Image: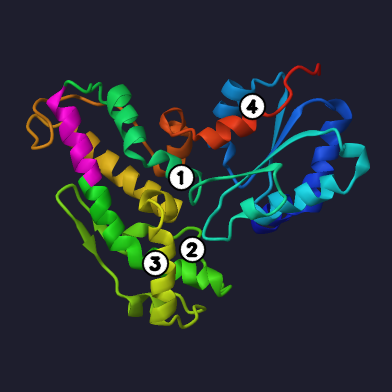
Amino acid sequence: MSVENLRISRSNPVAIFTEFTRFYKKYKFALYCFFEGEDSKYFGIRISNISRPEKDIYLSCGGKAGVLGIHRMLLARKEYENIRAAYFIDKDFDVSIRASNLSQIYETPCYSIENFYTSSKCFSRILKSEFKLTEINEDFDKCISLYIKLQEEFHDAVELLNVWIACQRQNSSKLNISDLSILRFVNIDLDKITVRYTIDDLYTRFENSSAISQEKLDAKKAELLASNRQKSFRGKFEIEFLFKVLLKLIEESNKDSSPYFTKKLAVKFSLQKNNIISALSQYADTPDCLHIYLKSFDLNQAI
């Protein structure tokens, strides 16, 4: 079986259900957690710290459809009516499920889990732990102010991109953006953010896109801007911005002289793009709604 076919099979609700039944025969009272992709890298530590289950089993369901699919399958079977199951999905640019009766499913209050990593609060935790800076240090204030400034510029630069992609999603256009780097559209430097695209470039780049009227673009823009852009914009773009800023600050911190630090800090923090979710998980935000959701599970049953 090819890697691609293996990936597809693992995201098939039937395959996930089969895997679940094997576990369930042995661990009937475990907490079963169904995730999109590798989202357990964010949720795992929070499940352990908040729910504190004696036994938890993580099952990756591919995308959102996989999580919703396994939820429907388990809900339809009476033999699993007492299962302790937690379901986690990203809101994305989709219509929220909160208006539905799917109360058993946790949906992020922002675009995706990546947005939990890009708030100024999360950034300040990283500065304190990895750069060893505190609030009474002028470099701390300097870095926070720089991050807020750059993030505002970044949001201005990617606003059209996010709005356009959201409209394409609404039109059910088949855009392949899963591995799309934001650096294709903007340059990220500590002195400024530079835009590298126009709306015409977007239509050229994505052959399967559909024409979007200015009226629809304006309406979607108003919808996304009704929330904090750091929360409503595409999470993978947001966290790539954070990644680039951190890499550049780490580089600056190790110089003998830098406009961003009053002295050399010799930061040894090693950060890779493919491990940022797990590497920074302890610093990411934990919203109240997630805390409440995890606390809702009965933790007193014996395994």
Helix, strand, or loop for circle 1? helix
Would you say residue 251 is visible in this rendering? no
**Which residue is nearer to you in this view: 62 or 282?**
282
Q: Residues within 10 Å of mark 1 (few under 14, many from 20)?
A: many
Dot 3: element? helix
Say which residue label 1 marks: 114
Horizontal and vertical percent position of residue 224? 42, 60
Q: Dot 3 corresponds to which residue?
A: 221
Q: Is residue 156 left or right of residue 259?
A: right
- Which one is in front in this view, the residue at disc 4 or the one at disc 1? 4
Residue receiving disc 4? 295
Tell me: residue 94, above or below residue 216.
Answer: above
Q: Nearer the viewer, mark 3 or mark 1?
A: 3
Q: In the rendered view, tell whether residue 169 sits above or below residue 244.
A: below
Q: Is residue 71 left or right of residue 208?
A: right
Residue at screen point 29% across, 24% down:
128
State the mark number for residue 177.
2
Give the spatial CA distance, label 3 vs label 1: 21 Å
